[in-house]
Amino acid sequence: MSERRYHMAEAYIVAASRTAGGRKGGRLRNWHPVDLAGAVIDDLLDRSGADPALIEDVIMGCVGQAGEQSLNVAHNAVLASRLPQSTPGVSIDRQCGSSQQSIHFAAQAVMSGMQDVVIAAGVESMSRVPMGMPVALPATNGFGLPKSPRMEARFPGVTFSQFTGAEMIAKKYGLSREQLDEFGYNSHRKAAATTQAGAFRDEILVLDGVDKDGAPVVHDTDEGIRYDASPESMAAVRLLQEGGSITAATASQICDGASGVMIVSEKALKDLGVAPLARIHHMTLVGHDPVIMLEAPIPATQRALQRAGMSIDDIDLYEVNEAFAPVPMAWLQAIGADPEKLNVNGGAIALGHPLGASGTKLMSTLLNALKARGGRYGLQTMCEGGGLANVTIVERL
């Protein structure tokens, strides 16, 4: 395996935390995203017992880097936490994979020997910084759009759209409306069962929230789960576009949330005197077709398994982000993976997709699920705007 061949130093995850997902305008609506992220940083300190002075960097994913999430949200979150003001922070935008990329950057820093303790995290308040705001605000004020003349020459007349890409994948892989609805229903069913069994409790940072009337309420469960979901209610939701197969019920939910993991070296592991949750086993990143856009997890997984010298059968659980139902369904089909190992606690269709926070959110859930089931290897991947995908393979210890 590549890591062994090059005698790379190891990187370990010693703490993982996420907030429960908040619905748009829901229980987390009064939380400034900087404070939300700061609360997760503090929780990672509590879980690991690490001296705040030991944290050498905070690498934080965030897609909507405008308004309350602008001016380096990562460092602002440091200043809203218990970390000393000397702790640096940097904000990452790899679209939906932003905080999964923060894991990769943190692990690379540790494996290179340059740093010993790094926090990888993500935050997105989609209630307070609406999706698309970094593009919409400048465009509305006459400051242009991201697609350049050279990009236009290469992709003439193309409007890059995740919705279009999701419909293209459904058609390419022969996925019907009924199949997508069934997948979405199962996401809610699994998430509801996991919540009712208390199985998310270990990964969730409990926060003070507000109910619909603004009264104080404890925010300790994912707010988007529809406990009453049924095949009939899924079938009643109208299509997002004429002639398509995807509805709002088979797309990820808009969500507020923050999440993070602490990644350390072997030396720091001994210094902290803490048992690791997992070892970073392999990391891969690919670029793919930006038009179909959301298919990249397939070649990324194929490359990751090949480079790690593994087969999909070696992996005990997989988290494939449910940006739209066709994405994990096409991935299952192309990889020949076991549907019983996929998103076993439900996914973003039920739990929400807080964009820049989803990478470390999924990692928290994956580690928790591996522990609960006694699994060894977990694989995480997600589609990302522009046709990108990260793959992370971890070994539970």
Image: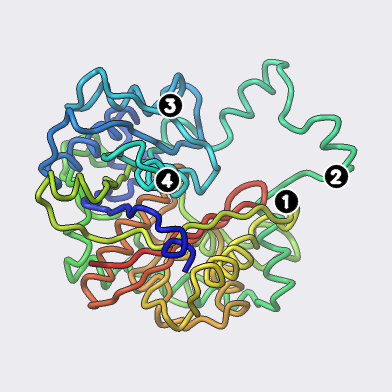
Position of 367 compared to 337: left or right? left
Residue type for callout 2: Phe
Q: Please report whichever mark, 2 or 4, sits nearer to the chain's N-terminal start.
A: 4
Q: Are marks 1 and 4 in contact (CB under 8 Å)?
A: no
Residue 69 disc label: 3
Q: Are marks 2 and 4 in contact (CB under 8 Å)?
A: no
Residue 108 disc label: 4
Secondary structure, mark 2, is loop
Q: What is the distance, in whole Å, between disc 1 and disc 2 at their CAs?
A: 9 Å
Q: What is the distance, in whole Å, between disc 2 and disc 4 at their CAs?
A: 34 Å
Q: Are marks 3 and 2 in contact (CB under 8 Å)?
A: no
Q: Are marks 1 and 2 in contact (CB under 8 Å)?
A: yes
When asked about the image quadrant of residue 31, the answer is top left
Q: What is the distance, in whole Å, between disc 4 and disc 3 at their CAs?
A: 25 Å
> Residue at horizontal 27%, vertical 48%?
18
The answer to whether residue 65 is visible is yes
